[in-house]
Amino acid sequence: MLDFKIYLSDEGYGHIVRQKAILDMINHYSNDENRFTLQTKKHMGVAKEVFGPGNYKEIYNNISWQKLENGSPDLEKIKNHYEKYNSKSSEFINNEEVLSGYDFLISDFVYEAFQLGINNKIPSFGVAHFTWDWFFSKLYPPSINSKVMNLFFNYASKANRLYFPLFTPIEILKHYKNSLQVPLIVREKNSSINITNSNFKILIIDSGSNLLKIHIEKSIENLADLDDMQFFLANDYKSEFKNIITVPKTRLMMDYIESMDLVIARAGFNTISECIACRTPMLLIGEAMNPEIQENIINLKNQGLASFISLNEFRSGLHSFLPNFLKNEFNSLKTNMENHELPINGAEVIAKDILNYIN
């Protein structure tokens, strides 16, 4: 039986789903129900729900980024947050538990985990579709000082392997010599929801930080007349319209993707990965000054795997946009989704590589 520790940053939900997919594959290929300790803070409730029984430590893992109301980076708050990061990082490492009993460490993507691996002579592995040094380097004016950026790179270079799925920016793959590109990382499709509604089914997904909340609230005000469409939203949104159904808090929005005809969301990596795996067409919402989102949009445009709507049009004109979109662009998008050949077994590839490394 293996015993390992998972370090999760406090940003979003995608990394929780990716790490659970990898855990399932490690259990499968090691023919055992291995022990894990998961450390995070902000989304601990979701992590426990997704991972199930295990050992959990509610500790903030240093990495987060601050946003304005429109979802774009708050450069001043980011600058203040990371101003003393190096000393916070040293304190975090010094205060960590004794790790000698673990077989390996894995993170998505807490930099200190890799230094802790070196300090404790334990293999460490990183999983991400972008690195924070890359993300912060794209912000202008620069908000992170060079000492912090150098520390990020120094830590990540100490990982035994960094796994990056398809659509990771090419400059990251070139930057890290210990990187390995893998297929998209998604869960096994055993938790989807069966919906028999005959209307055209549309799932609207917000970010894990509710960046689109005020925009979604505005956009759904005018959807009542689209009575040939059925919209599914998180339980946070209340509406008396018959064509709007809310998803219980006990369910992941991702569980509904396979049953949908269309997903409307920001271009978060986990959402697009799940849509590609389920072959569900995407209508993606633009987001100001977010380098991750912009990179994802460029890659999807090149592949012809998504259509796009501006934030303003989504907010004020979704009800008039959708009928024209479904008559025209949707059909070619659906064909492209049905016929793509992108591999989605990244969790399997990573699990096998880790097991080969530690055995």
Image (cartoon, rainbow, N blue to C red):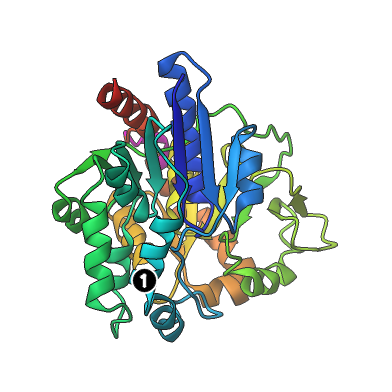
Circle 1 sits on which residue? 87
User: In the image, what residue type sits under mark 1?
Assistant: Ser
Could you tell me residue 69's position as x and y percent? Answer: 56, 80
Could you tell me residue 125's position as x and y percent? Answer: 32, 40
Q: Is 130 situated above or below 192?
A: below
Could you tell me residue 42's position as x and y percent? Answer: 59, 59
x 69%, y 43%: residue:
251
Task: Give the magenta-colored segment's residue range.
Answer: 337-341
Residue 340 in magenta?
yes
Q: Is 207 situated above or below 100?
A: below
Q: Is 137 situated above or below 164?
A: below
Could you tell me residue 321's position as x and y percent? Answer: 56, 67
Q: Main secondary structure of the magenta part?
A: helix
Image quadrant holding the C terminus, namely: top left
Q: Nearer the viewer, residue 86 or 329?
A: 86
x 47%, y 58%: residue:
61
Decide: few, some or many residues near mark 1? Use Cα within 10 Å; few <14, some 14-19, many ≥20.
few
